[in-house]
Image (cartoon, grey):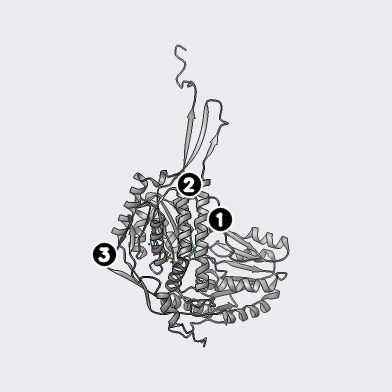
């Protein structure tokens, strides 16, 4: 299908945005900017086609130096022993600096990833809020005590920082995702090595400068840039790393877990999703339609939480899909720097090709494209919001993550069928259920095997609530009250007071 909408971008807006930051960025290792061995990775804006940033193509050596710096900062530095109040003060200062540089950070994420500027601004605000939440948890971190073990025994469980943490992040929410990990690791007293995606490194590198400005000691956070196999892989195998906190695809996450097995690191994995939005006939249809479109097309569908499977009660399927098609047509796709834009550019030509191939193979298997289905005419990389119907649950498009503005529609007749359909993929990140009936809403929510269930809403989030996946969507949870604990080890203290009862038989017996 040929979608004949032409997308234009505004060169004046682009020019203004480009003035806000330097093209060339350095890595951040041991409290200094490091250029690497001279090779760089150029990032072009997927919407505008121009080079927006150049970052060093780091190598295994750079990863090694960064890990050594973190190790030294952890083993011999003051950060792991700093008071919670001082750690919290640094984190709060970082939050203030993120607020101060909000516009620059939002522009960097927009130009490197193609996401709409209005959305990027709210992500940066959200990131600052997470740093503040982590600061509050830093001061709450405590262990346990057992005074009920008898008069001569006292049990204490201490929470100590786990050590050196490798943090590896994807391209779809550059500053937000590093902010779901780094402040909690720092709050626990850990030292870190961070590797952002090679496509969206600039806001994370900018964050490195803010950490130094906020007074984080040298070596406590190092940032290396480059390709996964070159700098990411050593971060998963190095014996000096104690934990890996990874967000990305299930395939790379699986490889990272396997690579870390030789040194038995703790892992926290936030991976892919194929999330169902289950809609019953008694739902508030306007709200459900709005949320379904939002879930499918937010961040151009390049979102682990995308509601990429719409499960409709058969009695409302036609009407609902007609309404969704209207919304898909109305969603403002275009220049990410335009504050009215809701769907921006696709991250890369390669990825846009993959999205189109998914749609093409679905068609070849008998699915029908109701709307969209192809790239839009433009010098940039834009894809029309797409609905695919006549889909069988066994088709690849119903099971695999497309990671584009493509939603599939499936139907059910009963609550049991809805739950079975919702659970019919290898993922389990999130799900939503739309019904005004409490039995239906809670019943489906409890039956779905997913880390987050939204009832009559979609993709709401707040740092207070944990986030993560069942099955192949991940291991562990981020955010929530345990977010700092995840970066700690438990140490049991068993204290004896008073005379000891001898293990030997009493002398002379
Ligand atoms: P990706 O897996 O390709 O890359 C993620 C990171 O891993 C990048 O920094 C990459 O350079 C690095 N990497 C690649 N190979 C590596 C290796 N061998 N060893 C170590 N690191 C390596 O993912 P992506 O394409 O950047 O992001 C999209 C994926 O991320 C989607 O599958 C999406 O669902 C997932 N995601 C999940 C969440 C979540 O919280 N569950 C959030 C956002 C994105």
Q: Which residue is mark 1?
A: 466
Above or below, 360 relative to 195? below
The quadrant in which residue 284 appears is: bottom right
Residue for point 44% across, 14% down: 507
Q: Quadrant of ligand 1?
A: bottom left
In the picture, measured across the screen, residue 284 lies left or right of residue 397, that is right
Q: Nearer the viewer, mark 2 or mark 1?
A: 2
Q: Which residue is mark 2?
A: 85
In the picture, measured across the screen, residue 195 lies left or right of residue 345, that is left
Q: Find out whether the residues at labels 3 and 1 contact each other: C-beta distance under 8 Å.
A: no
Q: Residues within 10 Å of mark 2 (few under 14, many from 20)?
A: some
Residue for point 54% across, 66% down: 305
Q: Find out whether the residues at labels 2 and 1 contact each other: C-beta distance under 8 Å.
A: no
Separation (CA) of disc 3 from disc 1: 40 Å
Q: Nearer the viewer, mark 3 or mark 2?
A: 2
User: Does the Cβ of the disc 3 residue fall within 8 Å of ligand 1?
Assistant: no
Q: Nearer the viewer, residue 395 or 140?
A: 140
Mark positioned earlier in the residue sequence (2 or 1): 2
Toward the left, the furthest residue is: 37
Separation (CA) of disc 2 from disc 1: 24 Å
Pinpoint residue 25: horizontal percent, then vertical percent.
Answer: 34, 67
Q: Which residue is mark 3?
A: 37
Mark positioned earlier in the residue sequence (3 or 1): 3
User: The residue tagged with tag 3: helix, strand or loop?
Assistant: loop
User: The residue tagged with tag 1: helix, strand or loop?
Assistant: loop
Toward the top, the furthest residue is: 508
Pinpoint residue 483: horizontal percent, then vertical percent.
Answer: 51, 52
Separation (CA) of disc 3 from disc 2: 39 Å
Mark positioned earlier in the residue sequence (3 or 2): 3
Residue for point 72% across, 61% down: 438
Pinpoint residue 218: horizontal percent, then vertical percent.
Answer: 35, 52
């Amino acid at each position: 299908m040929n979608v004949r909408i032409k997308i234009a971008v505004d060169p004046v807006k682009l020019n203004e945005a480009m003035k806000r930051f330097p093209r060339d960025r350095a890595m951040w290792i041991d409290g200094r900017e490091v250029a690497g061995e001279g090779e760089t990775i150029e990032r072009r804006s997927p919407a505008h086609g121009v080079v927006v940033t150049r970052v060093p193509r780091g190598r295994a050596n750079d990863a090694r130096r960064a890990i050594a710096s973190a190790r030294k900062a952890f083993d011999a530095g003051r950060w792991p022993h700093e008071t919670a109040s001082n750690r919290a003060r640094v984190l709060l200062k970082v939050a203030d600096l993120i607020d101060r540089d909000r516009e620059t950070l939002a522009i960097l994420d927009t130009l490197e990833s193609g996401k709409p500027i209005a959305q990027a601004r709210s992500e940066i605000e959200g990131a600052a809020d997470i740093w503040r939440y982590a600061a509050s948890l830093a001061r709450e971190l405590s262990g346990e005590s057992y005074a009920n073990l008898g008069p001569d025994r006292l049990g204490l469980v201490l929470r100590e920082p786990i050590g050196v943490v490798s943090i590896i992040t994807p391209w779809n929410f550059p500053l937000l995702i590093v902010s779901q990990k780094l402040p909690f690791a720092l709050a626990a007293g850990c030292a870190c090595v961070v590797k952002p995606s090679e496509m969206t490194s600039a806001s994370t590198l900018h964050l490195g400068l803010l950490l130094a400005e906020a007074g984080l000691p040298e070596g406590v956070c190092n940032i290396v840039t480059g390709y996964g196999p070159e700098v990411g892989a050593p971060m998963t195998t190095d014996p000096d790393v104690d934990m890996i906190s990874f967000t990305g695809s299930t395939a790379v996450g699986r490889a990272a877990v396997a690579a870390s097995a030789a040194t038995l690191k703790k892992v926290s994995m936030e991976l892919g999703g194929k999330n169902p939005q289950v809609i019953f006939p008694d739902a508030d249809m306007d709200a459900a339609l709005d949320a379904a479109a939002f879930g499918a097309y937010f961040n151009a569908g390049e979102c682990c939480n995308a509601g990429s499977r719409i499960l409709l009660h058969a009695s409302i399927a036609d009407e609902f899909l007609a309404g969704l098609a209207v919304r898909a047509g109305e969603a403002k796709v275009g220049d990410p720097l335009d504050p009215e834009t809701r769907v921006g550019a696709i991250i890369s030509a390669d990825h846009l090709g993959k999205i189109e191939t998914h749609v093409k193979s679905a068609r070849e298997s008998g699915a029908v494209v109701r709307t969209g289905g192809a790239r839009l005419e433009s010098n940039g990389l834009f894809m029309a919001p797409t609905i695919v119907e006549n889909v069988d649950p066994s088709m690849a498009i119903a099971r695999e993550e497309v990671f584009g503005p493509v939603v599939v529609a499936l139907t059910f007749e009963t609550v049991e069928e809805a739950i079975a359909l919702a659970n019919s993929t290898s993922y389990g990140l999130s799900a939503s259920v739309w019904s005004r009936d409490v039995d239906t809403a809670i019943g489906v929510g409890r039956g779905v095997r997913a880390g987050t269930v939204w009832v009559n809403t979609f993709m709401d989030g707040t740092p207070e609530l944990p986030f993560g996946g069942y099955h192949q969507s991940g291991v562990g949870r981020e955010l929530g009250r345990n977010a700092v604990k995840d970066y700690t080890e438990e140490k049991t203290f068993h204290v004896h007071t008073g005379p000891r009862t001898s293990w030997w038989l009493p002398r002379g017996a």
